[in-house]
Amino acid sequence: MVDEVVDPAFVSHDWPAGLEGPADFRTFYERALRANTPGARYVVDDLVAEGDRVVVRWRILATHTHEWSGVPPTGHPLTLEGMAIYRVQDDRLMERWGVLDGLGSAERLRA
């Protein structure tokens, strides 16, 4: 589905420089999410659209099986929370700005 909704000119302003388009979108999620949090479940808590912007407040529910944010694997549940704003043009994702609550997640793991 990524090829259908992510424009070749897509750019995320919060990912490492140089990642663009559907292939990099797919690779980022496979490496950053699936490889480090197998069995993760993505939950959309809020979805708001106005004009050419879509805002998503999300959670990723997983098991902490790999080092994350300097915390060795614990085997405990891991919840990552964040928000992203997407710019949409002609029903395709063009840009993304995202925020991850990494500090809050790391603090919960350390507790």
Image: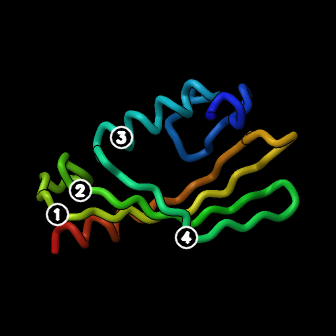
Lower position in the chain sequence, tag 1 or tag 2: 2
Contact (Cβ within 8 Å) of mark 2 with mark 4: no
Mark 2, residue position: 63
Residue 57 in the image: above or below residue 14 = below
Along the polypeptide, which appears first: circle 3 or circle 2? 3
Gap between marks 4 and 1 measured at Cα: 22 Å
Q: Amino acid at mark 3?
A: Arg
Label 4 vs 1, first from the N-terminus: 4
Mark pair 2, 4: CA separation: 19 Å
Q: Which residue is mark 1?
A: 76
Query: What kind of residue is marked 1?
Result: His
Give, as a three-letter code, the residue at label 4: Asp
Q: Is residue 8 above or below residue 28?
A: above
Q: Are marks 1 and 2 in contact (CB under 8 Å)?
A: yes
Q: Which mark is residue 45?
A: 4
Whether tag 4 and tag 3 are in contact, CB under 8 A, the answer is no
Crowding at dot 3, Cα within 10 Å, few <14 / some 14-19 / many 20+, comes out as some
What's the residue type where badge 2 is placed?
A: Thr
Q: Are marks 3 and 2 in contact (CB under 8 Å)?
A: no
**Quick check: 8 left or right of 106?**
right
**Residue for point 55% across, 63% down:** 44
* Secondary structure found at label 4: strand
Q: Percent position (x, y) of residue 80?
A: 38, 62
Query: For the residue carrying disc 4, how many other residues have a C-alpha within 10 Å: few (<14), some (14-19), or many (20+)?
Result: few
Q: CA distance from mark 4 to mark 3?
A: 20 Å
N-terminal of the pair, mark 4 or mark 3, is: 3
Contact, mark 4 vs mark 1 (Cβ under 8 Å): no
> Label 3 belongs to which residue?
34
Q: Judging from the image, what secondary structure is the residue with disc 2 in?
A: strand
Q: Position of residue 85 (x, y in %)?
A: 67, 57
Earlier sequence position, callout 3 versus callout 1? 3
Q: Position of residue 103 (x, y in %)?
A: 34, 66
